Amino acid sequence: MAFELALARLDFGEWLRRRRRAADARPHLNGALETFRRLGALPWGERAAAELRAAGAATTLPAASPAADLTPQERQIAELAAQGLTNRDIAAQLHLSPRTVGYHLHKIFPKLHITSRAQLRDALS
């Protein structure tokens, strides 16, 4: 129910702002933004933040963690590597080749802004 209420507040705030009633729109947009942040609805929060900026208020959204950019398979491989498993062990467990695991780890490290397997555990938490 909170999401639907926040969505209604966002719509009403947008409507008010488009009618050049920015001061009236800000409380509705701010309330919607706070609810979307609390619920973790980042796309809706970004939309509310953009409307708030258009209404003359300064806003920022919390940055998403780098681990959110990982695909499900990359996430699974990263978690197993963080536990200390070798590429061969990870490959056997996931029914992949060790080269495929190495390929995924090669893509994971830049996404997490790390350079070694030892940093994986901290990057994933």
Image (spheres, rainbow, N blue to C red):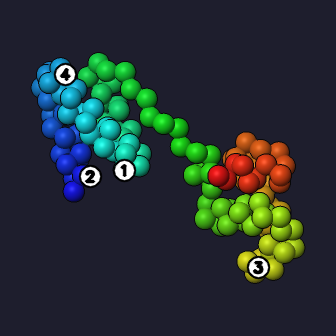
Between disc 1 and disc 3, whose residue precedes? 1
Can you give x and y, in whole percent of width and height, for residue 22 in the image? 19, 22
User: In percent of the image, x 81 and y 80: which residue is there?
Assistant: 92
* Closest to the observer, 20 or 60: 60
Quadrant into which the N terminus falls:
bottom left
Q: Mark 1 points at which residue?
A: 39
Q: Do the residues labelled 2 and 1 touch (CB within 8 Å)?
A: yes
**Nearest to N terminus: mark 1 or mark 4:** 4
Position of residue 13 measured from the top left corner of the image (x, y, whole percent): 19, 34
Q: Where is residue 104 in the image (x, y as percent from the top left)?
A: 75, 61
Q: Are marks 1 and 3 in contact (CB under 8 Å)?
A: no
Assign a secondary structure to mark 4.
helix
Q: Which of marks 1 and 3 is in front?
A: 1
Image quadrant where residue 44 sits: top left
Q: Distance between the residues labelled 3 and 4?
A: 56 Å
Earlier residue among tags 4 and 2? 2
Residue pictured at 83% horizontal, 68% vertical: 85
The residue carrying mark 4 is 22
Q: Name the residue under label 2.
A: 3
> SS class of the residue under badge 1?
helix
**Alpha-carbon span between mark 1 and mark 3:** 35 Å
Element class at badge 3:
helix
Discs 4/2, front:
2
